[in-house]
Amino acid sequence: MSEEKKVTNLSIRAAYDALSEIVGKNGRNILLKEAGFEKIIDNPPPYDFTVSFTTPEQARIYLAVVDYFGEVGAQAILRQIGYKGATLASEKGVADHLRDIPEPEQFFKIVELFHFITGKGKVVEVEPDIFALDAFDCIHCIGVKSKKQFCSHYTGALQGLVDNVKGRKTYSVVEEECRATGGKTCLFVLRKAS
């Protein structure tokens, strides 16, 4: 029997903070109640990498956002939650060591860091020196059918890490394949911004 995947306090705190910023305290509380997270409404987890939650618990927060705002309306919120999580992690210095690594290894290391922090996906080279996150274990689009890519949380998180290391608007993260649209996996590629 395999062990259930775990999630850090920082990941859940990022969702808590992003929801507070986007939908306000009352909206956040409604969504957390819907997700079964009443225990953190008045006592959010600390900004640390302690593993205190499970992946299915984390997924319930995202599903509550989708249930409340709809599949399309939820995407911007989920992207912001991912970006906020990466920003919080970067403020803790987790990406500082990547700034001095030369490209293209730097991009490999950014995706590898995402995998390390979240425990999700794996690093793949999709073209020479072009790296991506293959999120074969994506928690966002399980059972979802969509005409558009659906996993904006991962896009936001990777974009936050890239922006922290390379600066804003220099590189873009694009979900080029999504299981919700019929893909075999969810694939997030780092490309030079046009």
Image (cartoon, grey):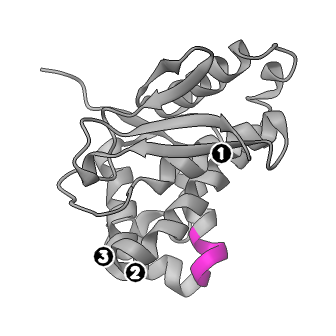
- Give the vertical position of 27 relative to 142 (above or below): below
Label 1, secondary structure: give it.
Answer: helix
Q: Quadrant of residue 16?
A: bottom right
- Give the vertical position of 188 relative to 168 (above or below): above
In the image, what residue occupies the spot 34% across and 41% down? 138
The reply to whether callout 2 and callout 3 are in contact (CB within 8 Å) is yes
Image x and y of residue 11, in percent: 54, 47
The N terminus, quarter of image = top left
Label 3, secondary structure: give it.
Answer: helix
Q: What amino acid is found at the position of numbered circle 1 in the picture? A: Gln
The reply to whether callout 3 and callout 1 are in contact (CB within 8 Å) is no
- Give the vertical position of 95 relative to 177 (above or below): above
Q: Which mark is residue 117?
A: none
85 part of magenta stretch: no
Pick the front one: 50 or 173:
173
Image x and y of residue 170, in percent: 80, 42
Q: Is residue 63 left or right of residue 24?
A: left
Image x and y of residue 129, in percent: 63, 16
Q: Quadrant of residue 148?
A: bottom left
Q: What amino acid is found at the position of numbered circle 3 in the picture? A: Asp
Q: Which mark is residue 67?
A: 3
In the image, what residue occupies the spot 77% across and 43% down? 163
Which stretch appears magenta? 19-24
Q: Which mark is residue 69?
A: 2
Residue with the mark numbered 1: 159
